Amino acid sequence: MNPIRYMARPLMGGLFVMSGVDVLRNPEPRAKAAAPLLDEISDRVGKLPADSVQLVQANAAVHVVAGTMLTIGRAPRLAAAALAASLVPTTLGGHRFWEFEDPQQASQQRVHFMKNAAILGGLLFAATDRRRSRRKSWPGATLVARALRRG
């Protein structure tokens, strides 16, 4: 396997696993931040559940599952595509820098927004990467899978 892919997938996937677990444990702050966007989408689409906590937890579950898949190299293109798709509402809901009146807070949110945009770019590269390696998964995938099963 290309050493860049060997390092990049666990680095990218691990970020989503850690943040997803954090949100699953404490979803309320993220749900509060995402509520304005969720209300906008619900008004336009009308098919979203009313409970923003459940929506944030569902998004976090996608992050944990797809992040784990990307980390261990199982269906990495599909995992990267799922993470990319879930990152868009995460970014738009959580880092609405244009709504902050305080310049310092707006600047911080802009940095987070742009960081997520950069991560999105990396995920799009991973999702469209068609190079094949001899191995179908990360060499440590078996060890990680066993550790996850043991809990």
Image (cartoon, rainbow, N blue to C red):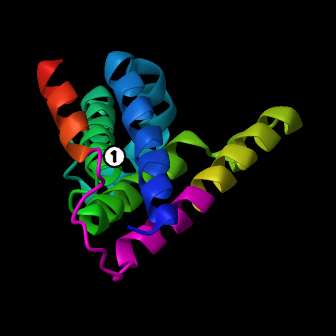
Q: Is residue 127 magenta?
A: yes
Whether residue 106 is situated above or below residue 136 in the rendered picture: above
Q: Is residue 128 magenta?
A: yes
Identity of the residue drawn at 15% across and 31% down: 146
* Left or right relative to 105: residue 45: left
Residue range of the region highlighted in magenta in the rendering? 118-140
Label 1 crowd (10 A; few <14 / some 14-19 / many >=20): many
Where is mark 1, residue-wise? Answer: 67
Type of the residue with mark 1: Gly
User: Seen from this angle, which residue lies furthest bottom?
Assistant: 130
Q: x and y percent of residue 115 in the render?
A: 65, 51
Q: x and y percent of residue 32 in the render?
A: 46, 26
Q: x and y percent of residue 133 in the render?
A: 31, 74
* Left or right relative to 78: residue 2: right
Residue 88 showing in the rendered view = no
* Left or right relative to 126: residue 67: left
Query: What is the secondary structure assignment of the residue under circle 1?
Result: helix
In which quadrant of the rendered image does the N terminus lie? bottom left
Question: Which residue occupies the foreground of this view, 84 or 43?
Answer: 84
User: Seen from this angle, which residue lies furthest left?
Assistant: 149
User: Seen from this angle, which residue lies furthest right?
Assistant: 103
How many labels sit on residues? 1
Whether residue 68 is situated above or below residue 6 in the rendered picture: above
Residue 117 showing in the rendered view = yes
